[in-house]
Structures are given as structure tokens and as C-alpha cells.
Image (tube, rainbow, N blue to C red):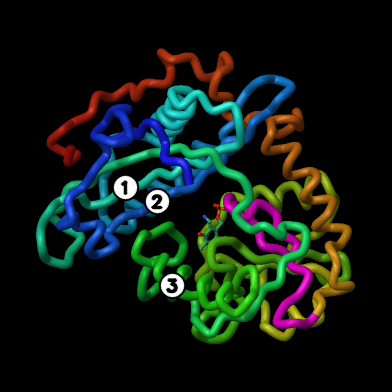
């Protein structure tokens, strides 16, 4: 992976080499942090990078922080503007990924969430596919169970909780699969290792509800709206049993990283025909038009990095950094 040239760190954009923490950092030792992953999409026609739904990603970021009792001195909008400024600073003219992190930066020993100081970083890197076989992935039901909301808040992107995702992902990949489908402790389908899950039966899309310990996915929300408004496909949120996947017509992972992945085999059984189905196929086509800013009805979800919507003077955080609230 190519390292970025810059990072937003300590309240400003600095060379990436200056964005460093010590080994005693609380967030590193105890996973006391939250993060967000967004994508920027290159639109060749307009010579523009569009960051997809940055304000919504940062709203969830701030909500995740709130669950850890972490107060950040920026609004979702200010963070979104900073993120577009960072991509502009990097000068990317290709698809990229933006990773934002808020973590307790204190170099101190003692597990807790109080009396600690948050630190925020944002970096952007060029990025392609997360799952290579987007048009036909092979998934397995994980032997690991999804972290329960009463153990670690499941609806947020909490750093420490990703040990759960990593266990599921590596187990699946080492066994020759592309990704894992993770169940809740009571045995319902929750989601993928880093993506939400949907299946299609008799033309209806079914997706596990938020209360089945899923992350409140932005792509899930996007896809539900596109299926309903643009494709006229009914979407039902309800619990899903594992055997229902084996008899589904189609199955999908949806997420910022995975984008829209057609799961065509699960545990060596074909899903439907064993090839990408009509809903996944049409949805992929539509989704990629939407995220690249090519669909006029959803242009408001796409934040231009170089265009008039992202003038440099608009991009700087409006509130100055209060160093008493941020470890620098
Ligand atoms: N579930 C998990 C565990 C994830 O890590 C992700 C990726 N952020 C998702 C679902 C999908 O969420 P989003 O569409 O907001 O990227």
C-alpha cells in the first residue's frame, strides 16, 4: 500500500511522517477509538473526485464517539470539509479511500473511558477493490459470532470491536473463501466482516434489522433507497436464519469498502443460479453511477473535491482547534 503524503492530525494538515503516536497511547492499547471509512470516486468527464456522503459518515462517526463518551470539537460538516481539503492537498485524480480516526491519545495505563483526551486523524489513500470478486464472491458462515451491542456497541464503528471482524475475515480467507457471514449470538444472520448483508427471495430484498447487532451502514441505507425509489424493489428489514441464505435467489454484501458484492456461493452451495443475479447486477450499475456523481437525483450525496463546492476557504475547519480538548 502506498503511504499518503499528508494527514489531518493535531487539528491541521501535516506531512504524513509527522502524524505519529507513542506506544503507550490509550487507543492503541485498549482499542478506545472510533473510525470511519469513506470513498472518493474519480469522475473522468468532470475531472473531479467525489467523496460519497461525507456528512453522513461523519454524523455516524460523531455518534460512535458519543457512545464512548468522547466529545470532538468539530461538526460533521466541518469534518467533511476537512476531508475534501485533504484529498485536494494529496492531488488525487483516481479512486481513493479516506480513513478517519478519533482515539484517546493519552499515553497512560488504566482501562477507562473517562478523563481522557481525544485525538483525531484523517488520511486518504488511492484505493481500488476491497473484495476482488465483486461479481461473484464465495462466503462462509463464520464460526465467530458478531459482537453483541451489550458487549461493545455494535451500531458504531468502535476500533476494538474490529478484532471480531478480523477473526471472522482471516478465518474465512485462510479457508479459501472471500469473506464471512457472521451470526448473532442467538444465531441470526448479522452481517459480513466489514459489510452489511442482504438477500433476495422472490423479488423481495431482505436485510437484517439494526437490532441484530449490525453496523448502521451508510451503503445499506443508500441501497435501500435506490432499490425502493429507482428500481421499484421492495425491501424488508427482518431477522434472517442461516438456512435462508442457502435457498435465496441472490445474496449481497454492501458497504463502503466492498461496494456492492454479489455473493454467488455460500459454504460451497450456489446461491440461486450460482452467478450474479438481476438485482445485484442492476444495483451495481446504478450504485456506481450514483457514487461517481453521474445520477442527477443523488448528486447532493457527492462532495466535489476540486470543484466550486469545495473552495479552499470553505474547506478549513471554521472553529479553531481548542488544544485543551485535543492531544496534539
Ligand atoms: N458492517 C461493518 C462491520 C463494517 O465495518 C462496515 C464498513 N464500514 C459496514 C457494515 C458497512 O458500512 P458502510 O456502508 O457505512 O461503510
- Numbered label attached to residue 164: 3
Residue ID for mark 2 = 35
Point out the tag, 1 or 3, that comes first from the N-terminus. 1
Quadrant where the C terminus is found in the figure? top left
Q: Quadrant of ligand 1?
A: bottom right
Callout 3: SS? helix
Identify which residue is drawn at 56% across, 34% down: 51
Q: Secondary structure at mark 1?
A: strand
Q: Secondary structure at mark 2?
A: strand
Looking at the picture, how far across and down is residue 117, in whole percent?
Answer: 17, 47
Decide: is 183 above or below 307. below
Identified at 78% across, 82% down, the residue is 269
C-alpha gap between disc 1 and disc 3: 19 Å
Residue 225 in picture, x, y percent from top left? 71, 48
Q: Residues within 10 Å of mark 3 (few under 14, many from 20)?
A: some
What's the magenta bit mostly, secondary-structure-wise?
Answer: strand
- Using the rendered image of the protein, determine whether residue 301 is visible from the camera's viewpoint: no
Q: Are marks 1 and 2 in contact (CB under 8 Å)?
A: yes
Does ligand 1 reach within 8 Å of label 1's beta carbon? no
Residue 227 is labelled as none
- Circles 2 and 3, Cβ within 8 Å, touching? The answer is no
Instruction: Read off the magenta span.
Output: 252-269
Residue 310's place in the image compared with 192, above or below, is: above
Earlier residue among tags 2 and 3: 2
Does residue 131 show up? yes
Amino acid at each position: 500500500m502506498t503511504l499518503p503524503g499528508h494527514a489531518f492530525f493535531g487539528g491541521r494538515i501535516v506531512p504524513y511522517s509527522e502524524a505519529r503516536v507513542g506506544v503507550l497511547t490509550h487507543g492503541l492499547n485498549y482499542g478506545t477509538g472510533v473510525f470511519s471509512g469513506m470513498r472518493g470516486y474519480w469522475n473522468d468527464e468532470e475531472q473531479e473526485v467525489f467523496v460519497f456522503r461525507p456528512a453522513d459518515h461523519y454524523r455516524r462517526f460523531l455518534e460512535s464517539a458519543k457512545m464512548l463518551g468522547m466529545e470532538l470539537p468539530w461538526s460533521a460538516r466541518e469534518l467533511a470539509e476537512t476531508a475534501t481539503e485533504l484529498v485536494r492537498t494529496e492531488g488525487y485524480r483516481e479512486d481513493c479511500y479516506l480513513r478517519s480516526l478519533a482515539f484517546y491519545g493519552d499515553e497512560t495505563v488504566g482501562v477507562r473511558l473517562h478523563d481522557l483526551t481525544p485525538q483525531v486523524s484523517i488520511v486518504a489513500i488511492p484505493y481500488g477493490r476491497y473484495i476482488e470478486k465483486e461479481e461473484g464472491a464465495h462466503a462462509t458462515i463464520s464460526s465467530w459470532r458478531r459482537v453483541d451491542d451489550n458487549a461493545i456497541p455494535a451500531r458504531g464503528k468502535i476500533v476494538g470491536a474490529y478484532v471480531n471482524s478480523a477473526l471472522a475475515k482471516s478465518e474465512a480467507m485462510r479457508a479459501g473463501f472471500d469473506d464471512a457471514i457472521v451470526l448473532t449470538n442467538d444465531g441470526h444472520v448479522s452481517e459480513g466482516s466489514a459489510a452489511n448483508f442482504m438477500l433476495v427471495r422472490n423479488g423481495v430484498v431482505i436485510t437484517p434489522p439494526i437490532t441484530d447487532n449490525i453496523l448502521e451502514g451508510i451503503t445499506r441505507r443508500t441501497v435501500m433507497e435506490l432499490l425502493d425509489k429507482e428500481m421499484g424493489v421492495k425491501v424488508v428489514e427482518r431477522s434472517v436464519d442461516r438456512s435462508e441464505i442457502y435457498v435465496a435467489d441472490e445474496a449481497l454484501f454492501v458497504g463502503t469498502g466492498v461496494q456492492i458484492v454479489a455473493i454467488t456461493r455460500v459454504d460451497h452451495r450456489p446461491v440461486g443460479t450460482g452467478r450474479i443475479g438481476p438485482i445485484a447486477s442492476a444495483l451495481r450499475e446504478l450504485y456506481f453511477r450514483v457514487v461517481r456523481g453521474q445520477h442527477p437525483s443523488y448528486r447532493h450525496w457527492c462532495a466535489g473535491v476540486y470543484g466550486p463546492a469545495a473552495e479552499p476557504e470553505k474547506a478549513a475547519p471554521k472553529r479553531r482547534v481548542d488544544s485543551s480538548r485535543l492531544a496534539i
